[in-house]
């Protein structure tokens, strides 16, 4: 049996094994998805030999049920279970009869950073910026690689960049960090430097300024000086991740759109509190607020706390899964522009004098 992915049996069936579910293909008759829990609950070995009644209750199964392999053999799906090495057998005809998720489409956040990356074609800064903005509209973010051979120090280009984005219809907005934010460990120029961004620590996925009623819509990050090691960037399309969540756990999605949590930013010279849901809107009006370092202790009724954590953590695990992330690093003069209402951003820990510049924009 295979440990992952497709294994073709001698008949027309096929199977793809995922973390918590698997997909059985019925040849030309399409496919159906089954949760591992549902399959093990319906194991052929847990039937009384004489009466064929089920002898197991699903509550007896491990919470984190895993399959170590799955294959189609002789017109039956065979699943091997990780916790007890048992092999369960499900005739394909029986699966078709009981299929509850026929021809389901699996939605996944994109993870190919090349798709959002463009190079300077020598067409001029304004044209490059227009192309980048078109990608941001579609994909939520664009990475622009600096043309090779440019000798200008990137720190001297920041104002040109701001000018080009302004000409293209964006407007610079200042925040409590200042107008242009120098993200470097020795920062002394910006206002309110007591935050993770000005250290060399990892900063995990978040949106910027979720504690503002109207957070900045876009952030431009310009690479000035790369780190000696580490300091890679990554983004997650939270709009797509929200669709994934909705497609696998409607209730969790609903809780994330309905539950207001408190974002509380408290620095030496700045304080702001806002209560808002993590997810709101859809499509063009979608907005995510996500910040593990500014979210206040949850204040929810006792009867809702466990359900809330379950929903929150399901979404968190989706976006923290590296298979759902766009990963890249910014060299000197490279830049990334992302939609702060749609994308989560993060960086890995680093060593050295890494220097990035950040600028916020609105439409
Ligand atoms: Fe940030």
Image (cartoon, rainbow, N blue to C red):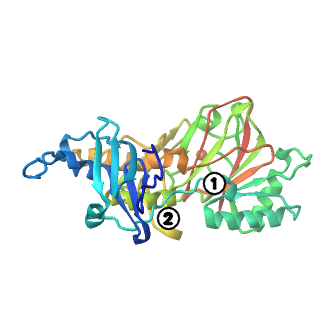
Nearer the N terminus, badge 1 or badge 2?
1
Determine crowd level at label 1: few under 14, some 14-19, many 20+ residues with C-alpha closer than 10 A. Answer: some
Relative height, residue 99 to residue 222 (above, below): below
Q: Residue at x 65, y 63 (%)?
A: 136
**Residue 202 occupies which quadrant of the picture?**
top right
**Residue 337 occupies which quadrant of the picture?**
bottom right
Residues marked 1 and 2 touching at CB (< 8 Å): no
The secondary structure type at the circle numbered 2 is: loop
Does residue 358 appear to the left or right of 250 in the view shown?
Answer: right
Residue placed most toward the observer, 41 or 123: 41
Task: Tell me where residue 118 appears, x and y as whole percent.
Answer: 76, 58
The secondary structure type at the circle numbered 1 is: loop
Q: Residue at x 75, y 62 (%)?
A: 165
Residue most extreme to the left: 51
Residue placed most toward the observer, 308 or 30: 30
Q: Which mark is residue 82?
A: none
- The answer, for residue 176, to whether it is visible in the render is no
> What separation in Å lies between label 1 and label 2 (alpha carbons)?
22 Å
Residue most extreme to the top: 351
Does residue 4 appear to the left or right of 95 in the view shown?
Answer: right
Task: Tell me where residue 70 appears, x and y as whole percent.
Answer: 39, 48
For disc 1, the marked residue is: 112
Relative height, residue 32 to residue 209 (above, below): below
Q: Residue at x 77, y 49 (%)?
A: 334
Determine crowd level at label 2: few under 14, some 14-19, many 20+ residues with C-alpha closer than 10 A. Answer: some
């Amino acid at each position: 049996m295979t440990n992952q992915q497709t294994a073709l049996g001698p008949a027309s069936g096929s199977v793809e094994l995922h973390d918590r579910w698997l997909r059985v293909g019925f040849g030309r008759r399409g496919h159906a998805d089954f949760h591992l829990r549902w399959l093990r609950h319906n194991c052929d070995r847990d039937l009384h030999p004489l009466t064929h009644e089920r002898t197991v209750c699903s509550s007896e199964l491990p919470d984190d049920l895993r399959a170590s392999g799955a294959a189609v053999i002789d017109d039956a799906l065979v699943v091997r279970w990780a916790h007890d090495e048992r092999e369960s057998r499900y005739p394909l005809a029986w699966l078709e009869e009981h299929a509850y998720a026929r021809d389901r489409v699996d939605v996944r956040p994109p993870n190919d950073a090349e798709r959002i990356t463009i190079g300077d074609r020598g067409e001029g800064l304004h044209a490059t910026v227009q192309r980048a903005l078109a990608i941001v509209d579609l994909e939520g973010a664009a990475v622009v690689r600096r043309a090779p051979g440019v000798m200008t120090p990137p720190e001297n280009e920041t104002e040109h960049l701001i000018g080009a984005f302004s000409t293209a219809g964006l407007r610079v907005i200042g925040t409590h960090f200042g107008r242009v934010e120098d993200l470097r460990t020795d920062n002394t120029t910006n206002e309110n430097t007591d935050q993770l961004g000005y250290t060399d620590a990892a900063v995990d996925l978040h949106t910027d300024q979720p504690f503002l009623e109207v957070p900045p819509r876009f952030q431009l990050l310009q690479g000035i000086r790369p780190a000696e090691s580490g300091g890679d960037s990554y983004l997650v399309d939270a709009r797509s991740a929200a669709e994934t969540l909705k497609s696998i756990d409607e209730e969790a999605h609903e809780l994330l759109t309905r539950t207001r949590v408190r974002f509380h930013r408290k620095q030496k010279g700045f304080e702001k509190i806002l209560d808002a849901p993590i997810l709101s809107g859809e499509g063009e009006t979608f907005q995510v607020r996500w910040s593990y370092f500014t979210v206040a202790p949850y204040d929810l009724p006792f009867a809702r706390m466990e359900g809330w954590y379950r929903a929150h953590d399901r979404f968190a695990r989706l976006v923290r899964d590296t298979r759902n992330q766009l990963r890249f690093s910014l060299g000197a003069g490279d830049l990334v522009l992302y939609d702060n209402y749609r994308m989560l951003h993060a960086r890995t820990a680093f060593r050295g004098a890494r220097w990035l510049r950040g600028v916020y924009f609105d439409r």
